[in-house]
Amino acid sequence: MKKATTIEAKVKEIVKKHGRDKSSLIAVLQDIQEEYNYLPKEALLAVGEQMEVPSSRVYEVATFYNTFSLNPRGRYLVEVCAGTACHVQGSFNLMDRLKRDLEIECGETTKDNMFTLEEVRCLGCCSLAPVVRIGGNIHPYLTQDEIPRILRNYRKQG
Amino acid sequence: MVNFIIDGKKISAAEGTMILEAARANSISIPTLCAHETVSRSGACRLCVVEVKKGKRAKIVTSCLYPVEEGIIVETKNERVMNVRRLVLQLLMARCPESEVICELAKEIGIETQPRFIPDKDKGKCILCRSCVRVCEEIVGVSAIGFSCRGADKTIGPPFNEDSAVCIGCGACAYVCPTGHIQMEATEDTRKIWGRTFKMKKCDVCGRYFAPEDQLKYISKKTGVPLKELAICTNCR
């Protein structure tokens, strides 16, 4: 139960920062996700309670936007761009390689909780295609051969 | 009062009236699924489309959400309207092939049983009109259900797909559901909805089971009427 109370305290802090008006719901959820890398169920229930928004509505918002995840994510989020430019430049090969090296499917998290692999539509830097974003860092003109080294570096950083 | 024409008939209605209501008041029928009298209009089912001619321009609008205007000419059954309505119905049929209500409407409008689009198998009878969500929020006031996900994965249900803690078992969502997607199973002393079983309350006077205990508790809390007074069914009051 200790974990739940700390989540509640954290949510309280975040709600206080953004105000209790329901229009700040998305900002609150974003901050919670920043904190935990995903949206824990306890946090969503606490948000509903503290902002006086029905939890059915909180759940609607949390499941509607792709940025929000209700499942725990790893330390680093690996986003493979599948936009037109990246696709043409062979981003699907990068995806295959990442799946093989990380031994997970798209949307899953590695056993050591380091990486979560996801496909995204467009990262907005098509001139750098193909692009993979890992933990917020853009890796431009990526080739398959570079992937093991990059993953090793992130693992080393911990 | 606003004067206008629907299907060649001169009609006047109070300002702010929607075309749908004005038409119905003058016995002109427009098919709808989601326009339920108890909930606010959303234009979700798109079946109530009509053509509105204003000056030289004619456009297709949802009649349930379009307030009447001076001098407009409304057509509810011309070829353009029927084309749109047929398409909407074909899409609805593809989404909910099992829905009797939609099949009935399709038959009335003259759509062949062979749908043009590949039918879905996993959507049940839900057309995502959100009437149930609105009645739960606007009328009941508990907001126990809502949508989850988006696009093709969008479904209706209690949050986290678990038994809702706030649902009072009133069954209003099942009542407004136009297609019968939301099912309420009732035995004499229980009622099952959204995966939760509610115990029914017996009337203190006639002994008939008449409402879920949770609903009475909620009403008592909201209105301040003591629970004891609510333990008598409406027939005996």
Image: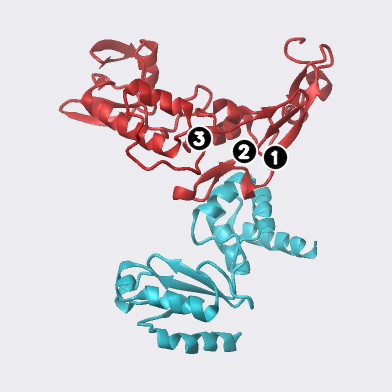
- Which amino acid type is marked by label 1? Val
Q: Does the rendering let one see residue B236?
A: yes
* Residue at x 61%, y 45% (from the top left corner): A56
Q: Give the x, y percent position of residue A77.
A: 52, 73
Q: Give the x, y percent position of residue B36.
A: 49, 24
Q: Which mark is residue B166?
A: 1
Is B31 or B181 nearer to us in this picture? B181
* Residue at x 50%, y 47% (from the top left corner): B154
* Residue at x 62%, y 38% (from the top left corner): B143
Whether marks 3 and 2 lie on the same chain: yes
Which of the colour schemes (rainbow, by chain, secondary structure, one colour) is used?
Answer: by chain
Quickly name the residue at label 3.
Answer: B125
Closest to the camera, between mark 1 and mark 3, is 3
Q: Which mark is residue B26?
A: none
* Residue at x 59%, y 69% (from the top left corner): A73
Mark 3 or mark 2: name the one nearer the start of the chain. Answer: 3
- Which amino acid type is marked by label 2? Ser
Q: CA distance from mark 3 to mark 2?
A: 21 Å
Mark 1 or mark 2: name the one nearer the start of the chain. Answer: 2
Tag 2 subunit: B
- Which amino acid type is marked by label 3? Lys
- The 10 Å Cα crowd at callout 2, few under 14, some 14 to 19, many 20 or more, is many
Q: Kindly indicate which chain is depicted in red in the rendered structure.
A: B
Q: Is residue B23 left or right of residue A76?
A: left
